[in-house]
Image (cartoon, rainbow, N blue to C red):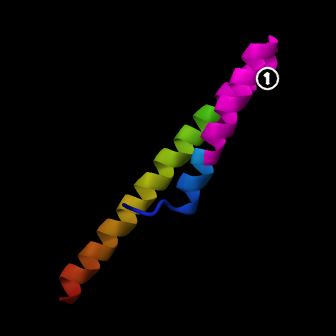
Amino acid sequence: MVMPNKTEMRGKINKAKGAVKEKVGHAVGNRTMEKEGAAARNKGRVQETVGAARRKVGDAVKGLGKTIGG
């Protein structure tokens, strides 16, 4: 299993917080809270994707360095 980086972890946390806020907003009938939760969830999804991409680029650079270095 690959260890997620800080950006991925922040994304997972924001995604979870957003989902909870969205559900609570829906449950109490607060459309503003529901929309804020959806926005936080989407922000988390983007952060997680960016973090995964950064990790993959870093892994590729390390692999390239090993190939070149022998």
**Quadrant of the image occupied by residue 7:** bottom right
Counting from the top left corner in percent of width and height, residue 49 is at 47, 46
- Which residue is at 80% across, 19% downward? 32
Secondary structure of residue under mark 1:
helix
Crowd around label 1: few <14 · some 14–19 · many ≥20 (10 Å): some
Q: In the picture provided, is 68 more to the left or to the right than 7?
A: left
Q: In the picture provided, is 26 more to the left or to the right than 62?
A: right
The answer to whether 55 is drawn above or below residue 29 in the figure is: below
Counting from the top left corner in percent of width and height, residue 4 is at 48, 59
Q: Most extreme residue toward the bottom, as rendered?
A: 70
**Where the N terminus falls, by quadrant?**
bottom left
Q: In the picture provided, is 34 more to the left or to the right than 2?
A: right
The residue at which mark 1 appears reads as 33
- Which residue is at 26% across, 74% downward? 63
**Where the C terminus falls, by quadrant?**
bottom left
* Magenta segment main secondary structure: helix
Please provide the residue range marked out in magenta. 13-40
Counting from the top left corner in percent of width and height, residue 44 is at 60, 41
Q: In the picture provided, is 3 more to the left or to the right than 8?
A: left
The answer to whether 61 is drawn above or below residue 52 in the figure is: below
Counting from the top left corner in percent of width and height, residue 33 is at 79, 23
Amino acid found under the numbered disc labelled 1 = Met
**Quadrant of the image occupied by residue 9:** bottom right
